Amino acid sequence: MSISLDEVRKVALLSRIALTDDEEERFAAQLNDILDYVEQLNELDVEGVEPTTRAIDVSNVMRQDAHSTYENREGLLNNAPDRDEDFFKVPKILNG
Amino acid sequence: MASIRELHQQLVSKERSAVEIAQEALNHIEKTEPSVKSFLAVTADHAIAQAKQVDDKIAAGEEIGPLAGIPIGIKDNMCTKGVKTTCASKMLENFVPPYESTVTQKLIDAGAVMVGKTNLDEFAMGSSTENSAYHTTNNPWDLACVPGGSSGGSAASVAAQECVVSIGSDTGGSIRQPASFCGVVGMKPTYGLVSRYGLVAFASSLDQIGPFSRSVEDSALLLEAIAGYDPKDSTSLKVDVPSYAKSLRPDFRPKGKLKVGVIKETFGTGADKAVEEAVEKAVELLQELGAEIQVISCPRFQYGLPTYYIIAPSEASANLARYDGVKYGFRAEEGENLLDMYCKTRAAGFGPEVKRRIAVGTYALSAGYYDAYYLKAQKARTLIKKDFEAAFAKVDVLISPTAPTTAFRAGEKADDPIAMYLSDLMTIPVNLAGLPALSIPCGFDEGGMPIGMQIIGNVLREDQVLEVAHVYEQAAEWYKRVPQILA
């Protein structure tokens, strides 16, 4: 399987990462190398094999759906790159 | 620097104070850091304040635990309240966690003295610590070589004796491979034994926190302190933590009872000759010491690496979606709108390897490719796990080299992702199966670089892994060698 420049651009947009032209080219080559490498898995017969999602099975962990107040509100908000009082501030969402 | 037990003895006999021990570690760090560069931040004030509390307890006649007053390094992907946690990424350059990770909280409660946050590959993605956005770390045995990774700073800090023990995290070998490269003991526990709460997530079904130390006993003591059920981690196992250190014995008793399997597929597949010979010699020694040796086949072992390089990036692409320049971390300034701001923030905030893995994961999970990649990898994971299950029906522990080579030179593999990934060939299958495993020094190559042997245990059999490692360590005595920079 080979990944084209267009596919790299699509993946970059899905990943929300802006790539330069240089990076697109380099990534296309490197992603192809990585995908070629993982092609080895086609040698394995996985017919009828159950997928493993986690190594050690743990049953669902349940707790009361009870709310509590987080004490360090300022500590959280202080980490924001931009804030307006108690809100996270972001650039405009829609153009126009 | 002395062992945990020796320092504990000095503290309770009032031969030395915790502040004196902390100051000694900080002085040594000042001397060695310019050449080794293990730390992203040295937390001197913090260390002295913690040490004072221990001294107050001793003065008040209170009993102290084994870790009280012990200088420790913490990998900088564990949240420490009020102390910057960067993950060696520009993305978290100014991130000050408003909460404490469970592991560091347990260490604080145990009285351990954090001397600094250690360097790593950005977001723990890498095998050489060269992917740190801040600086590289140098191998204390040869400063031109890498310390391994991603927990390279934690491994180097212990090898350079800048702290007695340290904490790392291991997703595909990130504790064991740097332990091997730096000639120290490093252990990845069973998935779920140590809480991941406050560990910055990379690949959640694989990540696990564990200890680094110069002796097996010190790793056993540190593991006891950090292990245990935590309601804040939904994958945490509800099990009692045994006293690993107390059950360590100087030899195998009774002889012939302990069955050791050597994984056939990890030999003759491109590992350095010196590495294979050292591990073979170690196995011979284990046999002389009374272990029963068998050769065991894990036919799907080699598929661990391709399986991992689908599963880990897929999980990473989802986990790292949170770095959007809104709630915390870096934000690129020139964003025209929200989408543009996301794309520019992530372009400038992440380094190349992190971007590469996010891209691979996004691709593998995207519409049309899920079955071909992610689902297939999860099925391969089942087969790899089954090989281990079959092996542990026959033996108590499994042995392989930890890494195919000794530490390579800085820059050697920096432009070739696949060559870099291959250094985790032997460690990755263990994470896929969730098993405990440890790397222990088992010799040196011609250039004087340390070689590591991996000892893998069955689920929650950390006790057996530590037992084998301890008996071997006491007989082989590799710990007597120290890096030249300390001589």
Image (tube, coloured by chain):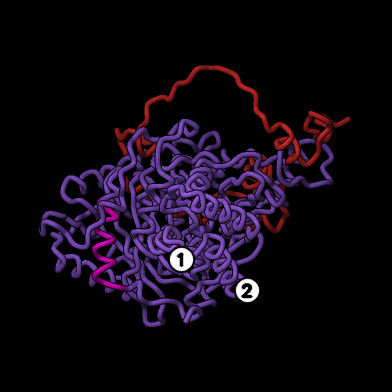
Q: Position of residue B145 (x, y in %)?
A: 51, 74
Tell me the tag on residue B147: none
Q: Quadrant of residue B288?
A: bottom left
Residue visible at 70% across and 59% down in the picture: A22
**Chain in purple in the render:** B
Q: Residue B99, position in %: x, y?
A: 61, 39
Q: Chain of mark 1?
A: B
- Residues B26 and A95: in front is B26
Q: Are marks 1 and 2 in contact (CB under 8 Å)?
A: no
Within 10 Å of disc 1 (Cα), the crowding (few <14, some 14-19, many 20+) is few
What type of secondary structure mainly makes up the magenta span? helix
Numbered-mark total: 2
* Chain coloured red here: A
The percent position of residue B65, horizontal first and vertical second, equals 42, 50
What is the residue that sits farthest to the front in this orientation?
Answer: B60
| Residue at the spot of label 1 | B15
Q: Which mark is residue B34?
A: 2
Question: Which stretch appears magenta?
Answer: B464-477
Decide which of A94, A7 is in the foreground and name it.
A94
Name the N-terminal-most of marks 1 and 2: 1
